[in-house]
Amino acid sequence: MMNIPVKQILAKMGQELGAAEHADEARLREHLLVIRSLCEVVLQEQPVQTEKILSTPTHSLLTQPKKNIETDDEGNGDSLFDF
């Protein structure tokens, strides 16, 4: 896999954006597809940062202790279905 600098990809995206601004409707779609492809290339090269952000809150939710809910009504258990 080639490591292309992100700045180089961003420069190419800027060129495509400039061309898209001056393109007719037929060519506009082509320029937008190129921009989308370049975005996907950058995002695929940096999945570790995204996964790290998503996994942190999940881990903290799993380690929290269970809390008992105290109510003043006549419920006879911890379940929502106990009446």
Image: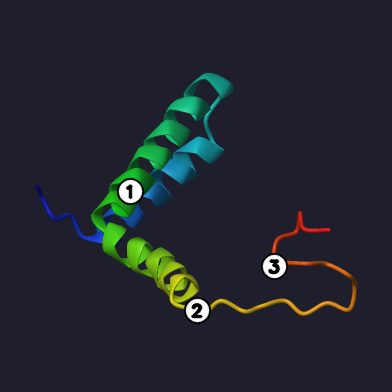
Pointer 2: what residue?
64
Please tell me which of labels 1 and 2 falls first in the chain: 1
Mark 1 highlights which residue?
A: 12
Name the N-terminal-most of marks 3 and 1. Answer: 1
Q: CA distance from mark 3 to mark 2?
A: 17 Å
**Helix, strand or loop at mark 3:** loop
Three-letter code for the amino acid on which mark 1 is drawn: Lys
Q: Which residue appears at 50% of the width and 27% of the height? A: 29
On residue 78, which mark appears? 3
The answer to whether mark 3 and mark 1 are in CB contact below 8 A is no
With 13 as the anchor, is 7 left or right in this view?
Answer: left
The span from disc 1 to disc 2 (Cα, nearest Å) is 47 Å
> Disc 3 or 2, which lies upstream in sequence?
2
The residue at 46%/38% (across/down) is: 19
Of circles 1 and 2, the one toward us is 2
How many neighbours does mark 1 have within 10 angstroms: few (below 14), some (14-19), or many (20 or more)?
A: some
Depth check: 40 or 51 in front? 51
Instruction: Determine which quarter of the picture holds residue 60.
Output: bottom left
Q: Residues within 10 Å of mark 2 (few under 14, many from 20)?
A: few
Q: Is residue 80 left or right of residue 20?
A: right
Query: Are discs 1 and 2 less than 8 Å apart at CB?
Result: no
Image position of 6 (left or right of 75): left
